[in-house]
Amino acid sequence: MMRSIHPTIRALFRLSLILLGLFTNVAMLTADERPSPETQACVVILHGMGRTHHSMGKIQTHLEQAGYAVSNASYPSTTEPIETLTELAVGQGIKHCQQLNAPVIHFVTHSLGGILVRAYLQDHVLSELGKIIMLAPPNHGSEIVDVLKDYRVYHYAMGPAGQALSTSNNSLPNQLKPIQGEIGIIAGNYTSDPWFSPLIPGEDDGKVSVESAKLDEMQDFWVIDSGHSFIMRNTQVIEQIVYFLKHGRFR
């Protein structure tokens, strides 16, 4: 009886070795295919005013799953002027990516974060500069700031950076020069703050108008039915971010 079992056991053992070899080869092939210029790239994520890095956590997760290294850190958006925030947020994010020897450094920003990148690139040359994706950026300021900037409560809550985002010709966003890089901008046209929308001309997301988000130097522009506060958590937006990083345009 033992002799009749042995051939079966030997056959199963040989089959297990063959399967193990196949899985090992597949794993080695996957490891060999993994390193590529794009998957070694690093993305600096910058949250908006009054938020923290947690607000961009969903984007971070998807980018890491897509093979990117990510820098996503909180910065004191409501207590420091933009000149200081550019170094604290943008500069430190770039340093993190450079420490990883990333050949390409991309940016994904929400609201104020986009202004910080524009401000940083005014007098910094980044040889590793890749693509820049801005979500709901007040690139030409916000009418909300025009109305509220002189109120003490607003000044206390939003700090000096909040004061700088008006729509006046001499406001910081409107004084910034065009920047290099492939720029994709996503704007929302569903108001998350209906009490503010009457103050904003045209379509808006409750804080920023669709027109204010645009830049002359942008490569692509996309509008989604989303409000300002949660546009960064929209699944379609995140899919478009990953697509733009790979193709330089929105789907």
Image (cartoon, helix red, strand yellow):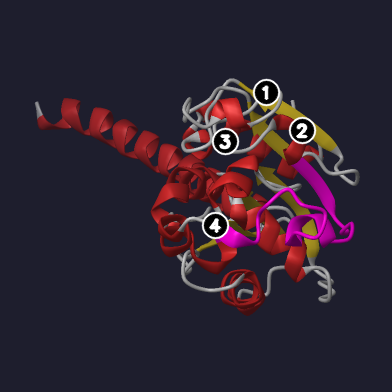
Tell me which residue sits at (78%, 32%) in the image: 221
Task: Please report whichever mark, 2 or 1, sits nearer to the chain's N-terminal start.
Answer: 1
Local SS, label 1: loop
| 195 shown above or below 79 | above
Quarter of the rendering occupied by the N terminus: top left
Q: Amino acid at mark 2?
A: Glu
Q: Mark 2 and mark 1: span between their CA atoms?
A: 8 Å
Residue 242: which quarter of the image?
top right
Q: Which residue is mark 3?
A: 238
- Magenta-span inclusion, residue 177: yes
Q: Main secondary structure of the magenta part?
A: loop
Task: Please report whichever mark, 2 or 3, sits nearer to the chain's N-terminal start.
Answer: 2
Task: Please report whichever mark, 3 or 1, sits nearer to the chain's N-terminal start.
Answer: 1
Which residues lie in the magenta part?
162-184
Q: Which residue is mark 1?
A: 203
Which of discs 3 and 4 lies nearer the camera? The answer is 4
Q: Nearer the viewer, residue 238 or 18?
A: 238
Q: Mark 2 and mark 3: span between their CA atoms?
A: 21 Å
Q: Nearer the viewer, residue 43 or 153?
A: 153
